[in-house]
Structure formats: structure tokens, C-alpha cells
Amino acid sequence: MASTISVDDYYQLWYDNNKNIQQSDPSDSSDVSYICPPQFGRGYERCIELRDISLMIIDEQFHDDLIFESKSEEMYVDETEIGFHLAGNYNCLDAGKNFIYSDGFYGTDTKVVALGQKRLLKVDIHFKPHILSSFITNRTEQIPPELKRLLEPNKQGNRNHQVDTTTAAMRLPLEQILNCPFHGLTKQIYLEGKCLELVALKLEQLAQSNHESTKSTLLKPDDIERIYQAKNILIQKLDNPPTLIQLARLVGLNDYKLKIGFHQVFGTTAFGYLYQQRMEKARLLVLEGKMSVKEIARATGYQNQSYFSVAFRKRFGVNPKSYRFNDESKIGG
């Protein structure tokens, strides 16, 4: 059952529930957490103010679906927002998706839906256009068009919105943000670097998207169906995957078309996807806590436990045992 609430009323209840703001890091007054009102669910929204960047980490679970309604005068928003959905569904975006909002005018009547009874985990980065301008010299003719659109004020039109798939390269700094081991000034420097890394990866994704839209390999419906078959085979054979040539033969494509087409459809290579799925299965088994690290390594295709631990740490920023401990301490109640 869904509940409808105005955005103003929703945030007023958050304010009433957080009159005594909790500092996530006692050594950093700009790092605060707001606890979800119990009538909505459980979890928190953490805001970390960095130099010219606001980092939001949202980790909560609502009792029921929530519909947020906003009715206000049209307003100009002078910042860019990049968001990464890691779990749950919010504003019709599932886990594994990311979005970018440019500056511009925000609509008057809007509705946003958050699905309940499932963990919602997302990371949002807010920044002003001048943070990108600071990296640019006087050679403005070399600025890519997708970056120019973010640098130039958009005071005539609405905010541009684009959704893409979060890549394996993006997943690593996201996990490192969520599992940041530092405090105080060191944490500020570390998180600023990770945020800028994500901004760079997102800009590269925009550039690749624009390039592929004009020069992508033409895939027939039958090709796409075979590429999905290849994806399913990789999922079924996580512990003993075929080579690229073997996989291509299994689905009736040549290896070049499979390689190019897989990246075009899923935003990563076939074995980049295999790595993602292996690590996701490993993550779930680690959180389940029923298997040893050695058993999880074998279940995900790693015969050597040390190689598995290195791969897990590369993906999630911490070793398997630390990851389970960190997850248990994130959402209370």
C-alpha cells in the first residue's frame, strides 16, 4: 500500500525527528546523519560537505511505498547532480543505474515514488559548474560538447536528465566511499578524490554514449537476443565460465560481434560483466554468513583464496570479513 505525502511535510517530519543532529564523524562537523522518522521506516541520510561538493549517502528502508508530491513555483537550480542507485527503487530507477541532472529550471508539479520494504541505498554528488571550470585552461576549443553543456549556465530551459548503467569502474569508488576508513581531514581529502573520480567516469560515459549513438555497431533483434543468451550463460557458469570464443560459438555469433555488442547492450565487456556477477554473488554470500571465505571463493570460480580476497577488496574496498562487519553496523533497529 502506498502513502502520499508532500515534500514539505516529509522534510518537516525529518526535521522534527532530528533536532539533535548526529555527527557521523566526531572530528568533522560537516559530516552529519539524519535518522529516518520511525513512522516511515528505518535508516539514515548522511550529508558530508566537501570543498564545493555535497556528498549524500542514503541508506534506508521504508515500511510502505511512498509517493512524494511537490507543488511549488518553477525555480532555477544552479547545480549539477550525479546519483548512483546501489539498492532498491527510487524515482523509477533500479539498482545498477545512475543519472545526471544539469542545472536549469525545475518543474512545478512533480511526483517521486520510493518503493518500500526493500533497502534503498544511493550515493548522490552535488556540485556547482565552476568546480569543472577550475580544471580548464584557455584551450576551450578542446572541451568536449558533453562537458560544455555542464559548464554553460542553462537559464532558459529545464534541467537535462540522462540515465545510464553504472559501470564496474564506477562501482569501485562507490564502495570505497561507503567503506571509507578515514576520519577528519584525511577523510575529506579521500572522499573529495573519490567524488571527482566518479564525476570523471560519468563524463567519460556521457562522451562514450554520444560517440556510440553515432558510430555504434548496428545490432539486429536476433543479435541482441543472442547477446542476452550469452549473459545468461555467464550467470549460469560463474564458477567455470567459457572463453569469449567458446561463448560466441554457444550463442551463434562471431567473437568480434559478441565483444562489441555485449558492451553496447550492457555497458561493459562480457568478462567485466562476469567479474561484476561473481563479486555480487560473493557479496551476498559474505553477508549471508553461512560459508567460509574459502568456500565463497570456490563458489564464485576462484581456486585461490588469496586471489579471491584481492579481487573482493579491489571491488568493494575492504576484505570479505570487514565488509560483513561494516554492513551489519550500517542500518540499526
Image (cartoon, grey):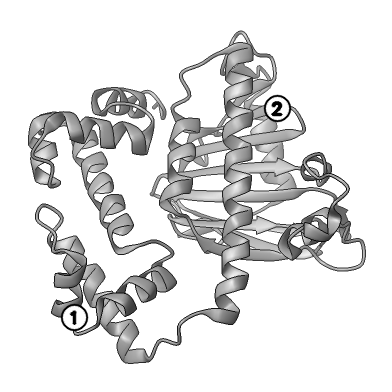
Q: As rendered, which of 94 and 70 lies closer to the eye?
A: 94
Residue 232 image point, x, y percent: 21, 69
Residue ID for mark 2: 49
Residue 102 horizontal side relative to residue 124, left or right: right
Residue annotated with mark 1: 251
Write the residue at 80% across / 43% down: 128
Question: What SS does tag 2 mark?
Answer: strand
Residue found at x 34% / y 83%: 224
Of 137 and 313, the residue lying toward us = 137
| Residue 4 visible within the image | no
| Residue type, numbered disc 2 | Glu
Residue that protrudes farthest toward the right in the picture: 156
Q: Amino acid at mark 1?
A: Val
The x, y position of residue 14, in whole percent, is: 64, 34
SS class, disc 1 = helix
Indicate the quadrant containing the C terminus: top left, top right, bottom left or bottom right.
top left
